[in-house]
Amino acid sequence: MNRALWLAACLALATPAQAASSFTDDRGSIWSLTYSGAPLPDADPLHETFRITLGVDTDAYALTGSFIDQVELKVSGSLSAFSLFSAPSSVSDWTLVPGGLNASGCSGSGSGFLCADSTITLNSGQGAAVTSGNGPGIDLAWVFDLTMDNGALFTALDEATIKAHYVGPSGDQHLVAANITLVPEPELWTLLLSGFGMLGFVARRRKALLA
């Protein structure tokens, strides 16, 4: 394989994930939406389940002492089943509500939307505490197992959506929303690029042996 073509292919694969995989909200938190790149093993021929992580890096968060009490995502037009694999504090501190999120809370409406709502057991119902200065990386994460029709996962640029509801230190409330790209986790991209590198090496080796 021509070296220039190989580099172009690598950049074509890596650039969209890096450019559109995160969203910085107006309070400085950085949100991301990732999955393994493949469905979980199952015996259902009509549906597939993906483990998807909605994460937030709160290192640059501007209002110390606030909470996130509700989050929402949409990665498919409809869901046939859903559950939480893990969440801030514990799974038992969050209730899943089919439907979207608005200023009044989990709306219970909208196909494909799924809202996670903290219960009274988590900081008296205020949700997950948000702090700043934690260093780079995800500080809070909600990991969902979402089941949908085969081929129904949203993987196009900015096709998925996320929302989050903040509760401020004085009881003020703030909703953030964004379209975002669901991307494979960084480890998978590293493996893919390593694989392309090995293909390039094998092609050069074969060419040298045939020369």
Image (cartoon, helix red, strand yellow):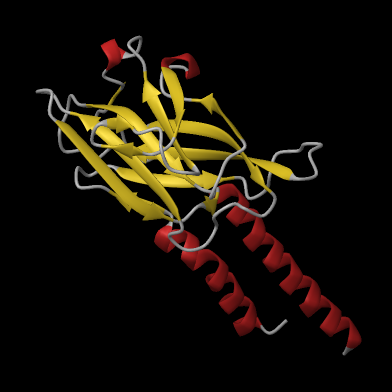
- On the image, the x and y values in percent for residue 21 come to 43, 55
- Name, please, the residue furthest toward the left: 170
- On the image, the x and y values in percent for residue 203 come to 79, 77
Q: Quadrant of the N terminus?
A: bottom right
Left or right: 118 in relation to 204: left
Give the residue drawn at x 59%, y 48%. Answer: 187
- On the image, the x and y values in percent for residue 146 come to 59, 37
Q: Is residue 138 visible?
A: no
Q: Quadrant of the C terminus?
A: bottom right
Q: How many marks?
A: 0
Give the residue drawn at x 68%, y 44%. Answer: 39
- Name, please, the residue furthest toward the front: 109
Left or right: 54 in relation to 198: left
Up/down of 80 relative to 130, above or below: below
Give the residue drawn at x 32%, y 11%. Answer: 120
Q: For residue 138, which quarter of the picture?
A: top left
Question: Which of 133/201 is in front?
Answer: 133
Q: Is residue 158 visible?
A: yes
- On the image, the x and y values in percent for residue 90 come to 46, 17
Left or right: 192 in relation to 78: right
Question: Which of 79/65 is in front?
Answer: 79
Question: Which of 11/173 is in front?
Answer: 173
Q: For residue 208, which quarter of the picture?
A: bottom right
